[in-house]
Image: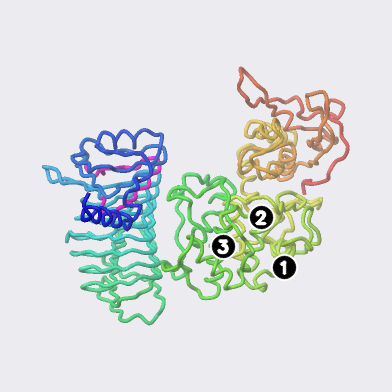
Amino acid sequence: MTKRTIALILALAMIIMLIPISTFAAPAGIAVTNAAGLRRVLTSATGGNYYLAADIKGLTGSSVKVAAGTYTLDLNGHKITGHIDGGQSPVILVCGGKLTIKDSVGGGAITHTEGADGSYADAVGTDSGTLTITGGSYSGAYGTWCDGGITNISGGTFTGDYFGAIVHGGTMNVSGGTFICTGSGEETAAIACAPYEGKGSLTISGGSFTSKGSDAVCHLSGNLTISGGTFSGANYGLYCSQRYTSPYLAVSGGTFSGGKAALAIFEEGVLLGDKVFSPAELDKESVNGEELFVSGTSVKVIMGDGTGKRSYRVGQFKDVDESKWYGVNGAKTIAGVWDNRLMDGVASDRFGVGTYLTIAQALVVADKIHCEYETGTVIAASANHSGKWYQFFVDYAIEHGIIKAGEFTDYDAYATRAEMVHIFAHCLPDSEFEALTVVEALPDVKESDKYGEEIFLFYRAGILSGSDKQGTFHPASKILREEAAAIFLHVYDKTTRSAARSWFASDPEFNWSRFPTYTKDCCDEILSAVIKGGMTDREKVIAIHDYMVNSYHYDYDMAFTGKSPYGDRTFDYTNLLNYGVGVCEAYMELFSLLCAACGVNCEMVVGPADNGRGGTEAHGWNRVWIDGGWLYVDTTFDDPIYYCNGVLTDHYSDQFLLKEEKDMTGHYMECTGKWLTAV
């Protein structure tokens, strides 16, 4: 081997050593090399990590549907091209599963090509489930289309003849990426929010949006929130037309420019009268008949009624039962937090009833209340803020004294009831929590406890009333979203607070003023259905007994495992009204309440009872004053649970309906509580 050859080998070795190792490293996951393989792995429902090892061309037929499972697809610098028949069908459609698309090398792309008949649609789309895009290029009539579910975009390039991206339903969150519209038709845009019937939302906190022929962002319906990004349109940076529904538009940041104006907002023939601009010193504002035009490269606009409020629609959340305490037929709790923009749903069609709230989510609401109180404006996160999504709100809370730095270490953790009160006790000055009643003691909280002072503050202000007749708070328990909503609304709106220390008192006279409005409404609805004019007290008791035994069921989980999915709420009568489930204490409370409300003298009875397993356990039932004497009723025992052919079910009984004390087999009365007697 010559010296020259050796020198060449050494030089080559040195060059190889200088090349990054990642150049030779294979992407993580399983290689995909053709259309059949791509369709097979993404529709398998097993999930997994995959990467393209070759370009895939000519993908036809139906969309590649990700219906279940969790996947990651790395384009790895390769391209997928195809034409999917069926109108607006994308090349890849997420319809129930979770898919993350990235491009670790660069140059990767998904393209929906035009068909022979001139039809073509989006490169990728979401019908349900979750689609996350961090890189790659996407082109077609639309780069991406969200028709339901959740689409999260933090990077990539989206090019469309009509829209770079469009929301027709569900939720799209954009924090980065490049969006380009190449077409020039009316109401085309780099990105558009135009959901059917307004049931969808688009949130933009960053990215670049350019329209070569029309508008950078087009808002026709639904909720659009912009806190950052660069928007440049041949006509307008932002074009908003309220033709189809009453969309909510909030712009608190971003740079806008357009050939005609930075901003154009109009409703067919009607100049909007509910616009609020902040700051007031816009570069130029001119009104031309039907339209409002704003010129300038940086604008802030909030559309609504001037306070950021919106209008709740019955049926907009599938998981909200409007007949429950939190519904529009009850305390209107969820409608209240929605209308005041304190809370959104966990999805476009779900509020999240029955799920817990995190500390971060609580801070968002506390910041909103504080910001509106102090400035009269709606808070919006900075688009330039680094870190997790909630970091802006954490920093705001610390800066304004809502919490202290380092006080919480895990903002994704579920908030306890005590932590929730602590946070919200500092989002307004103490003068906003004036006492409405005297509270000297609580069963499970002392003022010397951690957060005890704030808890007593809220009880005295009528924001809290306790989960049972004693006013029990349960400070360490997690709090459901609907329960948290009630606290938020009471803090935000003083008119919703109650002066009662607790919902129950030992006052021998029955008075609805001691109860929340929704309790009275629920009981009125029940009594109007079962109590008829001219009924005797005996007939009223029978009617109430039969209604309860046929309408509610005992908490099976508590009966057989000792643990309830409703926690301590299962002991309270409100759990029966809200969820139709409870234990004996809830049964006897509600029975006594309904009897007293329709004029029947009723008391609660407490003592041990036969547990059916050779022993006794604590129990509660009722007695009513009928025809000059006490008769006993046990709605819990008359609503027994048993197995029939392997199925756990309820069973109606009248074994313990209007019985004398000697006939209450298995019941051992220790005391009576003169709790609720009729006026």
Q: What's the residue at 28%, 34% (across, down)?
A: 37
The residue to which callout 3 is attached is 363
Residue type (three-letter) at the residue carrying disc 3: Leu
Lower sequence index among marks 1 and 3: 3
Across and down, in percent, residue 409 comes to 61, 59
Q: Does the residue at mark 2 contact the one at mark 1 (Cβ under 8 Å)?
A: no
Using the numbered discs, state the Cα–Cα distance from disc 2 to disc 3 in whole angstroms.
Answer: 14 Å
Q: What's the residue at 65%, 40% (across, down)?
A: 576
Using the numbered discs, state the Cα–Cα distance from disc 1 to disc 3 in whole angstroms.
Answer: 24 Å
Lower sequence index among marks 2 and 1: 2
Q: What's the residue at 48%, 51% (across, down)?
A: 346
Lower sequence index among marks 2 and 3: 3
Element type where label 2 sits in the image: helix
Residue type (three-letter) at the residue carrying disc 2: Arg
In the rendered structure, which segment of residues is drawn in magenta? 87-108
The stretch drawn in magenta includes residue 96: yes
Element type where label 1 sits in the image: loop
The residue to which callout 1 is attached is 435
Residue type (three-letter) at the residue carrying disc 1: Ala
